[in-house]
Image (cartoon, rainbow, N blue to C red):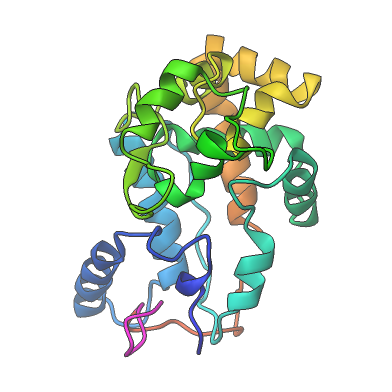
């Protein structure tokens, strides 16, 4: 099995799986083969956001774990930091998620990190003419260049929200309004569509509205084609023997 962890979007980026392993081990000791890794991930996602100050929601349970993974599928279905807005919209639409879901769910970038390699092009060669992205605040760009040089240090980490990096709040949207979104695929919500721009401005001014919509949209995302009933399995260990989920 070739793990989805090895896709370009996830490799050296998606982290913290050792926490999942510890929780799963404790669950199996108390209640063997009862709680799937899929449900565990959904619950941990909710609780992590709550711990960071974000909204809560009821997690639908009963998912079962897949018996196979699709590296190619994750490569094709996860937008890249350089994706156009239309590409991202199309990817979300294919999963039954609309534009409102897209903007709200990208608000999760109020926490987390990106590697230097994910946004370097914006700093040095945005259009292929050795130029900066003009939709990136120039003071912010200069600050980023200090830790993300034109070559090397690909794995250096930067906060997606440099203002409140460990708090789930609406500063992601405030940063976009100030042209301080780290990824091109984030900033384009404010620069390439009047419809998404209005949503960004609304959430930047109204954190409660963002929290309410985020909770609705993440429940919707969590209900995308789950395995239930006798489909799939309930794993006793979330990682395979080669340490891949």
Total tally of numbered discs in the picture? 0
Quadrant where the image shows the C terminus: bottom left
Q: Residue at x 51, y 73 (%)?
A: 4
Q: Residue at x 72, y 46 (%)?
A: 88
Judge by depth and name the residue closer to the eye, 136 or 108. 136
- Residue 225 in view here: no
Q: Is residue 5 above or below residue 81?
A: below
Residue 62 shown in magenta: no
Quarter where residue 147 is shown: top left
| Residue furthest top as drawn | 205
Residue 242 shown in magenta: yes
Judge by depth and name the residue closer to the eye, 90 or 20. 90
What x and y, as percent, mark residue 44? 36, 54
- Residue 107 in view here: yes
| Residue furthest front as drawn | 129
What x and y, as percent, mark residue 180? 49, 22
Q: Is residue 46 above or below residue 169?
A: below
What x and y, as percent, mark residue 161? 40, 29
What x and y, as percent, mark residue 193? 78, 25
Range shown magenta: 238-245
Q: Residue at x 53, y 65 (%)?
A: 8
Quarter where residue 99 is shown: top right
Q: Residue at x 43, y 66 (%)?
A: 11
């Amino acid at each position: 099995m070739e793990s989805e962890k090895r896709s370009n979007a996830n490799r050296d980026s998606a982290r913290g799986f050792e926490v999942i392993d510890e929780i799963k081990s404790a669950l199996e000791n108390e209640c063997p083969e009862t709680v799937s890794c899929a449900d565990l991930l959904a619950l941990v996602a909710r609780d992590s956001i709550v711990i960071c100050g974000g909204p809560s929601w009821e997690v639908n349970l009963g998912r079962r774990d897949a018996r196979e993974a699709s590296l190619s599928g994750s490569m094709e279905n996860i937008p890249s930091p350089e994706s156009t807005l239309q590409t991202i919209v199309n990817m979300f639409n294919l999963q039954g998620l609309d534009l409102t879901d897209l903007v709200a769910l990208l608000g999760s970038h109020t926490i987390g990190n990106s590697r230097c390699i994910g946004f370097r092009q914006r700093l040095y060669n945005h259009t292929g003419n050795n130029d900066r992205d003009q939709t990136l605040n120039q003071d912010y760009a200069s600050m980023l260049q200090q830790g993300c040089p034109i070559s090397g240090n690909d794995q250096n980490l930067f906060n997606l929200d440099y203002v409140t990096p460990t708090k789930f709040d609406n500063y992601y949207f405030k940063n976009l309004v100030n042209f301080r979104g780290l990824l091109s695929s984030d900033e384009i919500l404010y620069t390439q569509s009047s419809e998404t721009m209005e949503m960004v401005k609304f959430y930047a001014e109204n954190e409660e509205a963002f929290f309410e919509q985020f909770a609705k949209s993440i429940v919707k995302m969590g209900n995308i084609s789950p395995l239930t009933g006798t489909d799939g399995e309930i794993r006793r260990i979330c990682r395979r023997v080669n340490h891949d989920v």
